[in-house]
Amino acid sequence: MFTSIVGNVFGFKALRALRLEDLRIPVAYIKTFQGPPHGIQVERDKLNKYGRPLLGCTIKPKLGLSAKNYSRAVYECLRGGLDFTKDDENVNSQPFMHWRDRFLFCAESIFKSQAETGEIKGHYLNATAGKRQKKK
């Protein structure tokens, strides 16, 4: 939630100066989201990366690419040396890039980059979609 609100607001080029002085989160929201189920050590274990920072990036542009072109960006980043890539927090299933297609193409890119580099790679997909799509 924080990155969706603050990240997008602070990213507006028209704003020259902005300071966040207060953020109030409703108690009902806090009760439904207790934070991530595990920490950085689990991610290091999954990627088999220790003793250095994990290197990753958010794929941009977040809108406008087909699933195939999006996954090509994932592949190029991973093949180029990054440990992981991630969807922008606001990327979801779009008419031009359905979640399932993005998942399949990105999985192919991950496997291909792992085969070529000999390293474990990752991509964090935003798994939000409408109720109808979630059932598929």
Image: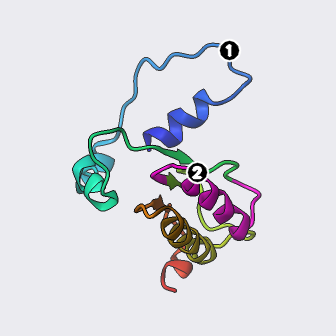
Q: Which dot, 1 or 2, sits closer to the camera?
A: 2
- Near mark 1 (Cα within 10 A), the count class, few <14, some 14-19 or many ≥20, is few
Q: Along the line of sight, which residue is nearer the eye, 116 or 26?
A: 116
User: Could you tell me which residue is drawn at 54 percent across and 56 percent down?
Assistant: 78
Q: Are marks 1 and 2 in contact (CB under 8 Å)?
A: no
Q: Is residue 1 depicted above or below 74 in this figure?
A: above
**Residue 126 visible in the shown view:** yes
- Residue 65 coordinates in the image, percent (x, y): 75, 60
Using residue 97 as the reference point, say whether residue 133 is left or right of it: left
**Secondary element at image label 2:** loop
Using residue 135 as the reference point, say whether residue 41 is left or right of it: left
**Secondary element at image label 1:** loop
Q: Write down the region rendered in magenta.
A: 63-84
Amino acid type, callout 1: Arg
Q: Which label belongs to residue 125?
A: none
- Residue 33 coordinates in the image, percent (x, y): 29, 53
User: Could you tell me which residue is drawn at 53 percent across and 45 percent down?
Assistant: 57
Q: Along the line of sight, which residue is nearer the eye, 130 or 126?
A: 126
- Residue 133 coordinates in the image, percent (x, y): 55, 79
The residue carrying mark 2 is 80
1 or 2: tag closer to the N-terminus: 1
Amino acid type, callout 2: Gly
Q: Quarter of the image containing the N terminus?
A: top left
User: Could you tell me which residue is drawn at 44 percent across and 39 percent down?
Assistant: 2
Label 1, label 2: how far apart the Cα atoms are: 34 Å
Q: Residue furthest top?
A: 17
Residue 78 colored magenta?
Answer: yes
The residue carrying mark 1 is 16
Residue 127 colored magenta?
Answer: no
